[in-house]
Image (cartoon, rainbow, N blue to C red):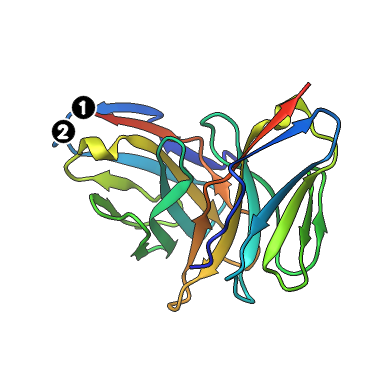
Amino acid sequence: NAGVTQTPKFQVLKTGQSMTLQCAQDMNHEYMSWYRQDPGMGLRLIHYSVGAGITDQGEVPNGYNVSRSTTEDFPLRLLSAAPSQTSVYFCASRALSSGNTIYFGEGSWLTVV
Amino acid sequence: DAKTTQPPSMDCAEGRAANLPCNHSTISGNEYVYWYRQIHSQGPQYIIHGLKNNETNEMASLIITEDRKSSTLILPHATLRDTAVYYCIVRRITQGGSEKLVFGKGTKLTVNP
C-alpha cells in the first residue's frame, strides 16, 4: 500500500511549455484533489473529483485541466505554463464516506522560468 | 465558505501542552473539522478530525465547543519534532453534493527546548 504517489517530485519548465503532474492512489478512494501551495500560504484547491468521470473546479482552476478516467489516477495538466504557476503541488485522496481521513502526497515542486 | 481563522504563530515549551485554537464561526452542521500539520515543505500530515464530540487519538486531542464555532487542538506533551505549521480545515459540502477542503493560513508552532 503506497498511499498517494506524485510524480515528478521536481520539474523546471519554460514559459509556454505543457506538462502533466501525475497522481495515483492505491486505496480505492473515490475522492481526489489537487492543491497548490505558495510561500507562506495555506493550500488552495485547484480541481477535485468525486469519482471516475467526474471532476469539478476548485478555488484556483485557471490554467489547469484534469481528468479522471480511472479511480486510481488523477493527472493535473498545465497547458501553457506561466511563471505564476511556480508552486508546490499536492495531490490528496480519501474515501467518500463522511469523516474519512484525507491522505496527501509528498508534493511536486514546479518552477516555471 | 466556512473559513477558519488561526493565530499566525505560537510558542510552546518542550514537554508542555500546546493548545492551538481555531475559529470556524460559519461552520455548518454537517461539516467536519480536520487538523493537519506540515513540516517544512512535506505533504500535510493528518492529526485528528471531529464533527461534534471531542476526540482523542495517539497524537492529540480535539476539543470542539458546543456551538461548533471554534475548536482547540491539544498536543499533550509537545516535543521539538512537533514544530510545524498546523492547519485547521473545514470539510465543506457543496450544493451539488461534492466536497472541498477549506484551508486557513495555519499556525506556525515552535516548540522550544
In the rendered image, residue B51, in percent from the top left (x then y), is placed at 70, 67
Disc 1 versus disc 2: distance between alpha carbons? Answer: 6 Å
Residue beneath disc 2: A15
Chain letter for mark 2, please: A
Tell me the SS state at disc 1: loop
Asked whether the residues under the numbered discs 1 and 2 touch, taking CB atoms below 8 Å apart as contact, a structural biologist would say yes
User: Residue A70 versus residue A14: which sits nearer the camera?
Assistant: A14
Going 16% across and 35% down the picture, which residue do you hit?
Answer: A17
Residue A100 shows in the view: no
User: Residue A98 versus residue B17: which sits nearer the camera?
Assistant: B17
Q: Are marks 1 and 2 on the same chain?
A: yes
Going 27% across and 46% down the picture, which residue do you hit?
Answer: A77
Going 72% across and 59% down the picture, which residue do you hit?
Answer: B71
In the rendered image, residue B41, in percent from the top left (x then y), is placed at 51, 31
In the rendered image, residue A5, in percent from the top left (x then y), is placed at 48, 38
Graded by Cα atoms within 10 Å as few (under 14), some (14 to 19) or many (20 or more), the crowding at tag 2 reads some
Chain letter for mark 1, please: A
Q: Which mark is residue A113?
A: 1
Which of pointers 1 and 2 lies earlier in the amino acid sequence? 2
With respect to residue B61, does B28 lie above or below?
below
Q: Is residue A67 left or right of residue A81?
A: right
Q: Is residue A93 left or right of residue B31?
A: left
User: Residue B43 versus residue B14: which sits nearer the camera?
Assistant: B14
